[in-house]
Image (cartoon, helix red, strand yellow):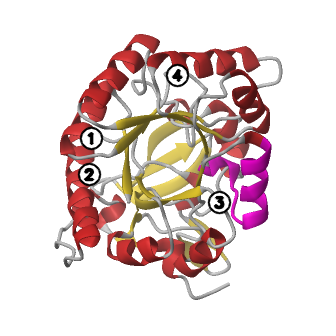
Amino acid sequence: MELVCPAGTPAAMRAAVEAGAHAVYCGFADETNARNFPGLNFSTEEMASGIAGAHARGAKVLVALNTFPRAGGEELWHRRLADAEAAGADAVILADMGLLAHAAEHHPRMRRHLSVQAAAANPDAINFYAEAFGVQRVVLPRVLTVDEIAAINREIDVETEVFVFGGLCVMAEGRCSLSSYATGKSPNMNGVCSPASHVAYAEEGQDLAARLGGFTIHRTPKNQPAPYPTLCKGCFSSGDQTGHVFEDPVSLDAKHLIPALAKAGVTALKIEGRQRSRAYVGEVVRTFRAAVEAVAAGRPMPEGALARLSEGQAATAGAYAKTWR
């Protein structure tokens, strides 16, 4: 299976390729991609040189243009499609139907992948995107079990890509409204979930309050580490309980499920983390490359402790192994 790895910066791209990534995914430094954070992403020149460097080492580059264009502002997304093709990208990752249609018409030779932001989670939806826009791969949302993925693969003729490590979103991908409610910025249009410009910390008595858009998301004692105020991982009161109502601050780690995902017909394994450091990227990629090679060769997967790189130093298999509805 292809190992698809994050590259939030040119340095992280080099680290991912050197660590054994089969492919890296990245985006331009603007609102066309869903990791539009200050200090991250690529200029047009950096994209071209990064792709050339990755190709020289035998790795592919997938460019994420996975936000939804603003009405009247489509020109930026159209220009970035042309920039990605000119730079030699191996594929573009798209979510918006209008942008998919534009890519199919004006850049027919450019391989098109359907972003997880499109939230296509059943055969009918996936086959629609394949037939209407020539999509060749779909990134599945993190709400499906392994058995459900296997069932989907039996009814589609496109490749499937799934997340195996990193951040875990509890919302249907591409449908989150919490952050946009609190900050006025849509993650799916502005490319930022819980934007740093709307984060504030304040001492209140013996506590440190972490706020997002004026809403207090966490209160921690002054001598304790204060988490970043992401809404879905915040602490809330519900009835007589106060705690992590939506999601615990943990990361996805599905390394032990790689054999099952291979049997389910998955083509590519995706690591989340374009906002992470190059050291993080290098270590995670090396671990998963060794695991993928072991599975392909029929060997036992190597043991590897990635817990210290996980959020809260804890991990979960997420929906892959869920037993509830």
Q: How crowded is the residue under tag 4: few (<14 C-alpha within 10 Å), some, or many (20+)? A: many
Q: In 3D space, how far apart are the residues under numbered discs 4 and 3 (Cα atoms)?
A: 26 Å
Dot 4 or dot 3: first in sequence order is 4
Q: In 3D space, how far apart are the residues under numbered discs 2 and 4 (Cα atoms)?
A: 24 Å
Name which residue type carries label 2: Val
Q: Are marks 1 and 4 in contact (CB under 8 Å)?
A: no
Instruction: Give the overall secondary structure of the magenta segment.
Output: helix
Q: Is residue 186 visible?
A: no
Name which residue type carries label 1: Ala
Q: Nearer the viewer, mark 2 or mark 3?
A: 3
Q: Position of residue 115 (x, y in %)?
A: 61, 46
Q: In 3D space, how far apart are the residues under numbered discs 1 and 3 (Cα atoms)?
A: 29 Å
Could you say whether the residue bearing mark 3 is in a helix, strand or loop?
loop
Q: Position of residue 315 (x, y in %)?
A: 36, 70
Name the residue beneath numbered marker 1: 16
Provide the residue span drawn in magenta.
Answer: 116-132
Name the residue beneath numbered marker 2: 285
Dot 2 or dot 3: first in sequence order is 3
Q: Is residue 206 above or below residue 90?
A: below
Q: Nearer the viewer, mark 1 or mark 3?
A: 3
Residue drawn at x 73%, y 38% as measured from the top left: 96
Q: Are marks 1 and 2 in contact (CB under 8 Å)?
A: yes
Q: Is residue 49 magenta?
A: no
Could you say whether the residue bearing mark 1 is in a helix, strand or loop?
helix
Q: In 3D space, how far apart are the residues under numbered discs 1 and 2 (Cα atoms)?
A: 6 Å
| Apparent side of residue 280 relative to residue 207 in the rendered image (left or right) | left
Name the residue beneath numbered marker 3: 157
Q: Are marks 2 and 3 in contact (CB under 8 Å)?
A: no
Name the residue beneath numbered marker 4: 84
